[in-house]
Each structure stands twice: as C-alpha cells, then as structure tokens.
Image (spheres, grey):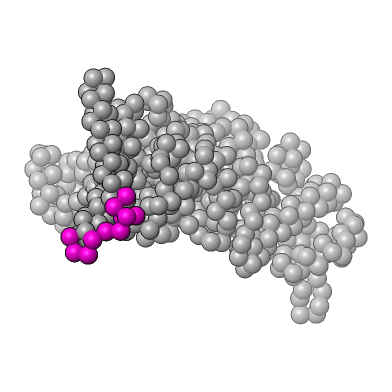
Amino acid sequence: MTGKIPKYFINELLSLTDIVELIKSRLILKKCGKNYQTHCPFHNEKTPSFTVSYEKQFYYCFGCYAHGNAIDFLINYERLNFIESIEELSIMHGMTIPFENTQDNFFYVKKQKLYLLMNQLCKLYQKNIILDNSANEYLFKRDINNTMISTFLIGFASFNWNIFCKKIHINKKLEEDLLVYNILSINKKGYKYDVFQGRITFPIQDQNGRIIAFGGRSINNFLPKYLNSQETDIFCKRKQIYGLYQVKKKFSKPKYLLVVEGYIDVISLTQYNINYAVSCLGTSITIEHIQILFQNTNTIICCYDGDTAGKNAAWNTLKKALPYISDAKTIKFMLLPNNEDPDTIIRKEGKEKFQIRIDNAITMSNFFFTHMLTNINLSSIDNKFYLSKRALPLINTIASDTIRIYLRQKLARMIGILDDNQFEKFLYEQEIKKIQKPEFYIKRTPMRILIALLIQNPDLAIIAPPIKKLKKIKIKGLYIFLEILQICLDYPKIKTGQILEFYRNTNINNILKMLSRWDHMIVQEEIQNMFLDLLTNIYDKILEERQEYLIAQERTIGLTMTEKKEIWSINKKLSNNKNFSKNNTHNTQKN
C-alpha cells in the first residue's frame, strides 16, 4: 500500500464505506443469496456475472475477472487514480486526508484552497448580478428566470476589477489568493483584471457539487463570445459535463441524457422542464465524456444543428462512441433545422413539440448507414467494395456480439450478399479471432489454502493458536500468513477488501486477490475445522523437522537431558494432533 496516506486512515475509510451502497448508487444491483449481482460495467455480457459481497466488502466478475474493494471500483469505474479515489471516499464521509508526504499534502491543500476560492468567487459573481443592470437586461432578453439563475448559480463579472472590488467589498487577502492561484491576472501595465470581466458566469460543478471552474458569455458580443476557465489541478475540460450535477439531483439514473452545445441551451431546456440536458462545455465530445455519460445513463441523445457541420460533428461523436455501445447502452442523434439551436427552437415550439423531436431521435444504426451511404451508388460494384471497406472496421469496434452481427448482416444485404451465413464465414476467414486472456493461475498448496481461508474469513484469526514460536520457522508462505493473521488480530472487524488494501502495489497483490476468491467447495460450517486442520498440519511439519534433527543428533553425538525432554514432548504433541485430526474427521463424517 502507498506510504503517502497512512494505512490506518485508508482502513478506517473502507470500514465506513459499504461497497454495496457505493456500487448501488451507480449500478442497479439485485439480491442473489447473500450477495448482489448485476451486468458487469467493465465488459459486455448478456447474463449478469458481476457479484458484490457485503460480507467481504469486495466485488468480482466471473466473466472478465474484474475484482477489488471500494477503492478499486472507483479507480476502474470512475477512472480516478488512487489518491482521487481516496478523496472521493473522504468527501463521502466528511473526512480530511492526513497525508504523510509533505509534497502530497501540499498538493492536496492546494486543491482544497482552489475549491474554496472558486466557491467564494461564485458567491461574489452571484451577488454582483443582482446589482448590475446590464447583466439583468441580458438575462431578461434571453428569458432566463430567477429559478434558473439560482439553480445554476449564474453570476456576473464586472467590466472592471477595481470597480467590482469596491462594489462587492472584496478584501485584500482574497484578492492576493486569487492572484497566487492565477484566477486573477495582471496585464503588462500592472492592472489587475478578471478573465471573465464583462461576462455572465456559469459555474461548472463536479459530481459532488463543488465549483471547479467557470464558463463565461460576453453580454456585448466581444470575442470570444464564450470562454472557459483554464485547466487547473481540479478542472480538466475533457472530463467535465455541465449540468450533470443538476440532472443527478433530480434523477439518480436518468432514462437518457440530452447532450447540447452551450450553457444557455442547458438552462433554457431545464426551464422548460426538459430535465435531462447537459453540455460538454462548448467543446467537441471526448471519449472521457462518452464514458461518463454512459456511467450515468443507458441512452445518450446528441443534439446537433442539421447543417453539414452538425452532421459531421454527430458522425465524429458516433465513431468515438461505438466501442462503448452494448446491448444495454446506445446513442441516438437529434438534428435540428438550420440556424436553430435548442434555446431558440424550444421557445418557438414549446416543450411538447420539442419532446417529440427527442422521442423521434435517429437510432445509432440508422444514422450509421445514412452517413455511410452519402455519395455511395449501390449499383456500382466498386462503391459496394468501398462501402464494405469503410464500414466493417467501425462495426468491428462494437463489443456487443448482437449489435455487431446485426450491422454486419445489414451491410451484407446492402452490398448484395443475401446469405448471412456466407457473409459471416467470409468475415471469420478475414479476421483474427479474439482470444480472451486466461486468468492468472497458481497451484493450490496447503499454505495458500490457509491464507485464502483467512483472507475470506478474517474472524478465523481469533481461533488460531499462539504464533510467536512460528516466526523463526522458514516455510514458504508462512511469513505472509502470520502477517495477515496479525492484521486480522489488530483490526478485529476487518473485511476482505480492507485486508487486500494493505497489499496494494506489492508484488503479492495479484496472488492475494486470487486467493480472496478461491472456491474451496466446502460448506460454511466446516471452514473452521478445515482452517484448524491445515494449521495443525503446519505445526506438525515444524515438529517433525525438529524431531528428525534431534534423532540425527542422538545417533551421532547423543542428546542432553533437555533435548531428550524436548523429543519426548514433540512425540506427545504429534500423537495428540493425530488423535485430534481423527476425531475431527469422524465428527465431520458423522454430521
């Protein structure tokens, strides 16, 4: 485990986190025995194989072998790094991370300071918009009501920083902090200025509602018309979606997300009770955006202008989205009339007609082939070959077998191959079969089984006999077992997921994860007996090695009185252990 954050803190975070609730807030889980199941979010599958254990605080997919604790889930599902996942859990539980490393602590404190400054600045902008007539006139003309101003925390940055400071009463300490963190700038003449001066401000919020940046729209049309904050330690444009926080406050799992281009579009649609609108900050959609959108809904509807530029933007979006489409997740397209955007058209048509446009959005397959057939003459053999050459590589990026085969068959009929089996045979001969990487395998040994039982059932530690004498014995794997045993004794309520966290970034991490999910094919009631039997066998092995050494000594140089007593004691212990094992086996068979 990393040394940058204390082990005790990570262990405490995991003990406070219920992995079932964490995953349930992102996926739909169904109770299955004592565990929970759902379709795996990390690979395409028809039958649910993703299992979450409350008892072990651990998840595992029997299809793609994805596995881990709450931290691993956040890393893999939310695409966070280790420290970001710890920060996410810390926010959930209202805790502050006590970094051991000074540099990391500085970085963490810097981020917290940025969150604080962004929040303070947001409140100042909000206060300013109430006082500024020009800003109010602009919002009045755009027909944005007070409810939307409050919901989206809309504000205004004055044309002059000094006037803004006096009007809002900004103190010198805050001004200095804004300069230090490059939120406020100084020009060549030494004048302080706000990059958003003369702009309506739209705070950009992360999934926890924290303000991480701003978008700005000029009210007198000076260029650029729209502007975003520069990227910082808390803001990465390609990973943020405007309006998602507001949507998620209303719907934990929205039926769809309507992706539009601008801040005003999102706000206007929300004002007309189209409560699923989000925006990619006025930039082209990225792969990260698509991943985040699909994490929050099963259907993405992208809204673009109906002109050539809009259709090309939609096509680029589809190409990026194809690898993430599955039987459960799809993308659609809504093309608006020329010279219209969501803000203008909903004000002309109203909610009902706009909703009809959403309901009639173009499906992924229809849009795919409509675009592919542009300027294609299917009566030409060369055009058919050209179509096949362009379409097949894109179709093959789709993970879903069902969708991939459907699109292939549709393509086959377009180019004149009416026998679906013949076409699939052709494809089989042309492609290299995907071979699923087998799971890492290790041989089962008594020591590994013993470690596996302890990881899976940490409460077994309390029935283990004293271990002090074993620490000097050299048996492969014994040191690891004793170390895990001590962890279990030090943390009596520890779970499987917490134990594994102690070994993150170690060379035995993968082996321990595998042992944590070994199926021992024995009923729960017999796990204690099996654990004690294995321990007894290890003790016997140690005693037998000592016994053999003493016997060899007796034959060569003889034994002292102390050594004779020791060999007698060993014989007695071995005899008692054998009787214990026989009785234990007899009782097990009897039961």
Rendered location of residue 311, percent (x, y): 42, 51
Q: In the image, residue 478 lies at what x, y percent?
A: 34, 53
Q: Residue furthest bottom?
A: 188
| Residue at x-position 87% and y-position 59% | 170
Q: Above or below — where is 525 with respect to 514?
A: above
Residue lying farthest front? 561
Image coordinates for residue 398, horizontal then vertical, percent: 29, 47
Q: Is residue 233 left or right of residue 535?
A: right
Q: Nearer the viewer, residue 182 or 365?
A: 182
Magenta stretch encompasses residue 559: yes
Q: Nearer the viewer, residue 434 or 301?
A: 434
Quadrant of the frame with the C terminus = top left
* Quarter of the view holding residue 411: top left
Residue at the extreme top: 591
Q: Start and end of the magenta stretch?
A: 555-565
Q: Residue at x 55, y 33 (%)?
A: 252
Q: Is residue 207 left or right of residue 113?
A: left
Majority secondary structure of magenta residues: helix
Q: Residue at x 59, y 30 (%)?
A: 351
